[in-house]
Structure formats: structure tokens, C-alpha cells
Amino acid sequence: MKGHGENFMKYRFLLSELVHKNIKLQYRDSFLGMLWTFLQPLLTMIVLSFVFNSLFGRDSSKVVNYPVYLLCGRLLYEFFSSSTKRAMRSIRSRAGIIKKVYVPKYIYPLSSVISTFVTFLISLSVLVVVILFFNLTNIHPIHITWRIVFAVVPIIILFFFSLGVGMILATLSVFFRDIENIYDVVCLLLFYVTPIVYTIDRLGFEAGSMQLKLIKLNPLYGIIDMFRACIIWGGPDTFWQHWSMHIMLYCCVAAVVCLVVGFLLFYKFQDKFILHI
């Protein structure tokens, strides 16, 4: 562990440069540049709200503010999807450098996840602006409470969960090229089985049903629900209905397991990468 820590400290400046480079390359040919970090989730929220609000946003007792509800889920899902996909491609896309220069290979998927995390944090400003808009116009205002500080918990869990999944995918994609196409389908399925555009009660499943249990097995469900509890349901009567300590513990365990499995798998096969990239 000491050797790994020293190795990380030795290459920390390279990691910082790679993160900075990844962010710059993301908007290199874009006229609006970093502004898209703000505009993309905002425009997506407007379109999806227009399409789905009549279906899933009618019951104000269950959805305080549908556009904000949608945006919370969309922002967190988009970070998970984008960060894991970039981490998955990080080794193969740098095959030329890996073959010529020694750099700890974990630096590449790690920098991909961190750079996506930075843009995700910037995109959270959209959520602030949208909430201010609804509160100032008094259109379905959201009462923000001190419990908003707990929002950092699901964000941290999501970061480590995404990093763990990204490390697993980065390893698998070196040996199985089809994993990229398979994962695109998996992400699409995750979007629909995770309550992002709908509320879980709209599915009509009975409490304790097998379908409901399967949906809640998805760590993204718990992470997004906890985040929404801090933003939308911060009141004392509603917060604990959505912030379950059991779900939080489950999400933490899932993140740690993915992280450990991801790094162990990566370290076990990293010496064989050069033979396959």
C-alpha cells in the first residue's frame, strides 16, 4: 500500500494535467465551449419535461416540481454514464503512449472519471438556477432546508461507484472489444429502469413485489433518491421517507465492492494490456 501511495504521489501532477487536458478536449471544437456544460442539461430538462410532465408530473403530492425532479436524476445518471464510458475507452485510446512511455495505467481511467466529475460539478449550477427560477416566480417553489448539505453523500458514493465500474470496464474492453457496444445497451436499459423520468409509484407495483425489489437493487436508484431527498424532500416529514439508512448502506457497500473489484481486476491484468491494445 505504501508503494502504491508513493507511486500515486509521484504521478499526481501528470494526473492533474490529464484531467485538465480531458476537459479541454471535450469542448475543443465547440463554439460555446464550457457553456454546453450548462446548456445541455438545461435543454434536455426542458424537452423531457415538455414530453413527460403530463404523464408523470400531475400529482403534486408525489412530485413537488417535476422539472427539478427530472433534472436531479438526469444529472447524476449522465455523470455515471459518461464517466464510465470514458474510463472504458481510456486504455485503448492511449495505446500509442502506453507502448512508448511508462505511466501507471490506472492514471488514465482515473483521470477520465475525475475530469467528468469536474464538469458534473459545474453542471450542478443548472440545478441551482432552475430552483431559483421556480422559487422567484413562485411556480411550484421548492423549500430548501439545511438537509441539502447531505447531498454531498450520494455524490461521493456515486463518484466511487462510477470509478469502480469504470476500472472494471477499462480492463474488460482491452480483451473484449464488443464490451463497448454491450455497455451502450446496458446504459440505455439503466436509464429506463432507474426512476429518472418517472416516479417509482407510477409503475403500479405492489410494495414488496419482486419487480420493485429488482429496481431497488440498482445502486443508481438509491443514490438518485437520496440526492432528491436533500433537494426536493428536505422537510422533516418527507426527508426520511426517501433517505433510508438501509439504502445508503447498500449503496456504500456496492460502491466499495465495485471499487475493490475494479482495482484488483485492473492490477491483475494490466501487464497484459500491451499485448492486446
Image: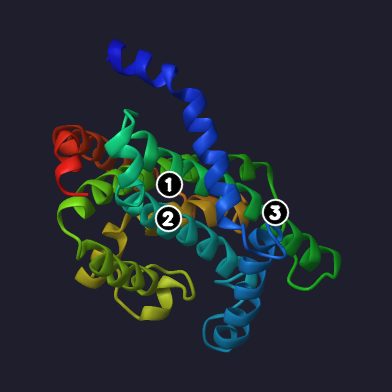
**How many C-alpha atoms fall within 10 Å of the one at disc 1: few (<14), some, or many (≥20)?**
many
Q: Position of residue 212 (x, y in %)?
A: 28, 68
* Kind of residue at badge 1: Leu
Cα–Cα span, label 1 and label 3 = 18 Å
Residue under numbered circle 1: 158
Local secondary structure at mark 2: helix
The one of 249 and 275 positioned closer to us in this rendering: 275
- 64 relative to 213 in the view: left or right: right
Q: Nearer the viewer, mark 1 or mark 2?
A: 2
- 269 relative to 130 in the view: left or right: left
Residue under numbered circle 3: 125
* Kind of residue at badge 2: Phe
Q: Residue at x 46, y 49 (%)?
A: 243
In the rendered structure, which disc, 1 or 3, sits on the residue that comes first in sequence? 3
Asked whether disc 1 touches disc 2, contact meaning CB atoms under 8 Å apart, the reply is yes
* Kind of residue at badge 3: Ser
In the rendered structure, which disc, 2 or 3, sits on the residue that comes first in sequence? 2
Local secondary structure at mark 3: helix
Asked whether disc 2 touches disc 3, contact meaning CB atoms under 8 Å apart, the reply is no
- 134 relative to 59 in the view: left or right: right
- 60 relative to 210 in the view: left or right: right
Judge whether residue 252 can be spotted in this image: no
User: Which of the numbered marks, if any, corresponds to residue 80?
Assistant: 2
